[in-house]
Amino acid sequence: MDDAGASLQAEMSAMGRAAKAAALRLRLADAASRSRAIEAMARAVRAEAPAILAANARDVAAAEAAGTAPALVDRLLLDAARLEGMAQALETVAAIPDPVGAEIARWTRPNGLDIARVRTPIGVIAIIYESRPNVTADAAALCIRAGNAVILRGGSECLASNLAIHAALAKGLVEAGLPEACVQIVRTADRAAVGLILSGLEGAIDLIIPRGGKSLVARVQAEARAPVLGHLEGLNHVFLHASADLAKAVEIAVNAKMRRVSVCGAAETLLVDRAAADTLLPPVAEALVAAGCELRGDAAARAIVPMSEAAEADWTTEYLAPVISIAVVDGVEGAAAHIAAYGSAHTDAIVAEDPGAAEIFVDLVDSAIVLVNASTQFADGGEFGFGAEIGIATDRLHARGPVGAEQLTTYKYVVRGSGQTRP
């Protein structure tokens, strides 16, 4: 190992030790103290807005100069409104019920033992993410709310933005009397830092959360020496059942695809029930095209509406752009089969007036989020009332769907007796 590598390893190991110590402080801090810290972080973000926006402008200019796709630039971009949204999200997290210490269940055994299942912090969480600087603030707030210390490693494309946001967050923590080490950020773009995090930092890290593209998540899951909470891409579907109300079908399909194409909750495939495709597809397709969306369809869809031919790769492509693939399927079972074959278990929706069909869809589709008569763009922790989110977990353990403060806790059993011994 050269001197630079040894220096980085020493720096990262020190971050791990500091995070462990900070996690103990947070575990002992009461809910009000953690609320005050998050509120102070929100004030600091507003106070440091000029510095944050200036840093973000440098990141955006560099991304555009490098030919970064517009959808990815949009993910990176901060403006006054988005920065205010970031501060408001912090305040929302500060106000949500504190999960730490909450009783999930409680019962008494015949021998008199009182047993409670109680939420407790996970400890030290490492979050590796790309593109979105708002994740820096959201992740910090949610981890503090749940009593966890956090080590953040954002993408090189938004390093300046992340460092500026973190500087503000650190000021808020100090103002509230908590250690700066409660929220640490990797200050280098050196990819070796990711490898060191995946090693677990000598046992300091209790959970690793990747938020980014398929290659990042695959690397983390393959190399991590600590538990991983996965977040795959959003290969999301909207299924128009034969019973769908046409007005709802048009509005939901357009919103799900076009409201914001760069988010992981954007729909990438439209499925249309063969029994009503001649009626449903033309007006929905017309509305999507009018909104600026490119259509790529299978043979059955192209026979109804002129559009480009969908290749096999289209069914597994997260476009993050104004492009949607369209397939005609045989009822709920056909839609569920298509989703099972090509989806990422992220978010899928049905538009249907037939409640029986909707419930069959809910039962058959095993995704983290399943919606009935609503846009996939609701795949967002803020929309679920969590205040913010670290991502949409697509694993089946330990959490699924939007990851908020409650999902960043584990639990322990507290057993209270009066002198019982086991015979």
Image: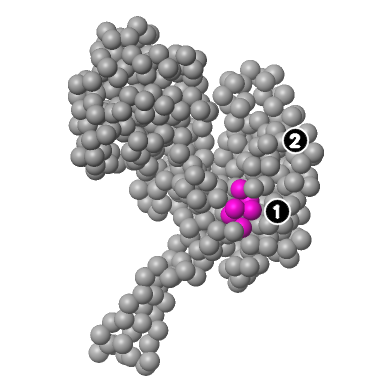
Residue 218: name its quadrant.
Answer: top left
Q: Secondary structure at mark 2?
A: helix
Q: Main secondary structure of the magenta part?
A: helix
Establish if 109 lies above or below 87: below
Q: Name which residue lies at 37% across and 70% down.
A: 105
Viewport quadrant of the N terminus: top right
Q: Which one is in front, 257 or 174?
A: 257
Q: Position of residue 339 (x, y in %)?
A: 29, 31
Residue 48: name its quadrant.
Answer: top right
Q: Secondary structure at mark 1?
A: helix
Q: Name which residue lies at 38% across and 8% down.
A: 308
Q: Residues within 10 Å of mark 2 (few under 14, many from 20)?
A: many
Amino acid tagged 2: Leu
Q: Position of residue 39 (x, y in %)?
A: 68, 57
Q: Position of residue 142 (x, y in %)?
A: 57, 54
Q: Which one is in front, 326 or 213?
A: 326
Q: How is the image coloured?
A: one colour
Q: Which residue is mark 1?
A: 41
Specify start and end residues of the magenta stretch as a single range: 89-94
- First in sequence, mark 1 or 2: give its number: 1
Q: Residues within 10 Å of mark 1 (few under 14, many from 20)?
A: many
Q: Is residue 224 visible?
A: no
Amino acid tagged 1: Met
Q: Which residue is mark 2?
A: 53
